[in-house]
Image: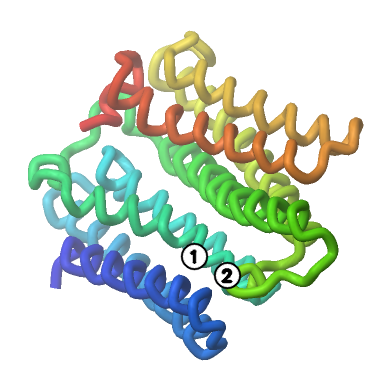
Amino acid sequence: MTSSLLFNSATLSYFAATVMFFAYLASKNKTIGLAGTIASLFGLLVQTVAFGLRWKESYDLGHGHAPLSNLYESVVFFAWTIVLIFLLIDAKYRYRAVGAFVLPFALMGMAWAQLMGDAQKQIQPLVPALQSDWLLYHVITCFLGYAAFAVACGVSIMYLIKAKHEQSSGKSPAGGVLSLFPSSKILDDLNYKAIMIGFPLLTLGIITGAAWANYAWGSYWSWDPKETWSLIVWFIYAAFLHARITRGWVGKRAAILSIIGFVATIFCYLGVNLLLSGLHSYGGG
């Protein structure tokens, strides 16, 4: 049994969960919604074991580092954090319809990772800049923050759909698929709570990244493209929270800003690595 095989199994589980969540929206069958949650949990557990096995494989090859050092490993870890945050929210609120708007992010990440070439999947020794415990702290905090923003984005899309229906139909109750959506007020609150989770994690990620940069390159901040875009993302979500707390921004404006923030997050994560050169360029390989 190899870690690659287990990652493939996790991908299939997330695919099954996504299909089940969409089937739940179509059928309104609570059993199917529960099956989607169970498939998500199964995939998360399989992927967790896969991470442990890949870590062991790294030691067996004489490298001995956490599986968080290249684009392939970071993408599968990102997918893992998205499912983790979703399941925590699902365990508390039981809004299974949210899965249809969040699990696809994890599924797309895992599918893309599995389609990468063998060279990108290989376990390689760490470059000098990555040989630090700060790598673990920085990556974990950043991606947990990114995952919370992914959940907020999915919820915001749901909010815009639900709010548009409520605006067009007045006070008449939603029918069909929309009847399974939480109320627009609850969706707005979930968006806020997810960002309240993600923002301090992103802040910790930037702080640990600065400490890591000082260890690796002798400077806490060098305006590298990755650092600059991380700051842009931080300012977007800081503006969201500031507008929410001081100016009472709720509803459509908050949902749109949340989606913009996640688009910026994805560019910070993937666009910078793949399109721009800088101190973080090793992350694209």
- 31 to 102, vertically: above or below: below
Point out the residue furthest to the bottom here.
31
Instruction: Report x, y in % for residue 56.
Output: 23, 60
Rounded to the nearest whole Å, what is the CA distance between mark 1 and mark 2? 6 Å
> Element type at marker 2?
helix
Look at label 2 and name its amino acid: Ala
Q: Is residue 145 left or right of residue 273?
A: right
> Element type at marker 1?
helix
Reading the image, the residue beneath label 2 is 97
Instruction: Report x, y in % for residue 267.
Output: 43, 29
Which residue shows up at 32% across the image and 68% down it?
Answer: 15
Instruction: Report x, y in % for residue 241.
Output: 78, 35
Mark 1 vs 2: CB contact within 8 A: yes
Q: Quadrant of the C terminus?
A: top left
Point out the residue furthest to the left here.
118
Which residue shows up at 40% across the image and 73% down it?
Answer: 17
Viewer-nearest residue: 40 or 126: 40
Which residue shows up at 28% across the image and 39% down it?
Answer: 71
Reading the image, the residue beneath label 1 is 100
Q: Quadrant of the N terminus?
A: bottom left
Which residue shows up at 71% across the image and 70% down it?
Answer: 174
Disc 1 residue crowd, few under 14, some 14–19, many 20+, Cα 10 Å = many
Quarter-of-image position of residue 126: top left
Quarter-of-image position of residue 155: bottom right
Q: Is residue 108 left or right of residue 222?
A: left
Say whether residue 128 is visible: no
Look at label 1 and name its amino acid: Ala
